[in-house]
Amino acid sequence: MQVNAVTELLNTATERERALVTRVEKGDLANVVLTEFKANILQQRLLLAELKQKRDAHAQMLSFYWRSPKGDMLIVDEANPPKDINWPFWVGNGQLMTLRNALRNHPELDVMKLEQQVVNNKAALASNALLPKLDLKASVARDIGSGPSNLDGTETKVGLSFSYPLGNRKAKAEQAQLQSKQRELEHKLTSTEQAITQRFEQALVYWGQAKDIVALQSENAALAKTLSKVEKTRFDAGDSDMFVLNARAQNEIKARIKEIKAKVDLLKAELTLYKEAAMLHSLNN
């Protein structure tokens, strides 16, 4: 986008250069004015070359991540990038609510809750091991033989056994250790929940600021374009000089580049919100 913006402005400046050449040949302008204008165009061409260099370098880096469904690297055509990248990480009021709700099911919390459940189960088993045991046993028998004292009918015996575990020092130590682990995991879970929320809220503040900056930079770019256009009109009418005209042109270029950078920063801010909510997903296109 930056390359296209500077190219567009440079093409306009090149057309203006031809008009200035004609005026110098007719004697309407001094040759030094044309020289100064050419120097300004040279600065724009140098800027364009630097932007293309950065664009090509980023395209090469992107090709490492830009893969086919089979996993092969795809070549990014830096001169003809896609006009629509199908950005899926948009953020709106409804989407913000979805992202906030996703914080409760954050993978970091799920892992810790599972670990907490395992420790809770172990602690329950350790507590049971320290409880006294009470066993009830019932026996039923029928007399089938002869003897000095025959049983009449069915004989029933009931036995009650009560025992208390001896030497339970080891079991108590294990129980205390598990209870300490429970408290540790509880504090750790609370701390992690707060850290996740804090990171999300921080990303949310940055996203709001990025939106405001985009609006301001867009307004600034529009104003710089208007001032540059007005200055060209004044120069053609003889009410301005080449120095001011070139300064307006440079300001227009800088404003356009800052506007584009602000829009990219906003995309990064949206991406960060999804990342902190653990809602990034892969795209197979």
Image (cartoon, helix red, strand yellow):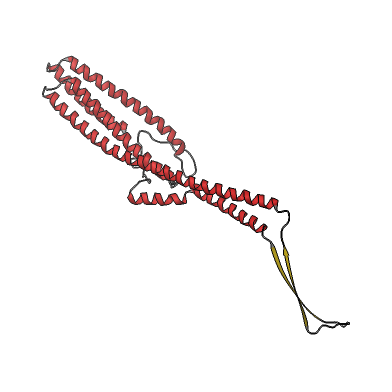
Q: Kindly tell me whether residue 47 is visible in this rendering.
A: yes
Q: Work out whether 132 lies above or below 36.
A: below
Q: Residue at x 31, y 40 (%)?
A: 211
Q: Residue at x 18, y 15 (%)?
A: 31
- Total numbered badges shown on the rendered structure: 0
Q: Kindly tell me whether residue 282 is visible in this rendering.
A: no
- The quadrant holding residue 36 is top left
**Where does residue 139 sit, x and y in percent of width and height?**
76, 74
The furthest residue to the right: 148
Q: Residue at x 31, y 25 (%)?
A: 47
The furthest residue to the bottom: 152
**Where does residue 6 sit, x and y in percent of width and height?**
28, 29
* Quadrant in which the N terminus appears: top left
Judge left or right: residue 138 versus residue 106. right
Judge left or right: residue 13 versus residue 260. left
* Quadrant in which the C terminus appears: top left
Q: Work out whether 10 lies above or below 218.
A: above
Q: Residue at x 78, y 84 (%)?
A: 153
Q: Work out whether 167 lies above or below 34.
A: below
**Where does residue 143 sit, x and y in percent of width and height?**
82, 81
In this rendered view, identify the residue nearer to me: 144 or 54.
144
Q: Work out whether 97 lies above or below 251.
A: below
**Where does residue 196 sit, x and y in percent of width and height?**
45, 45
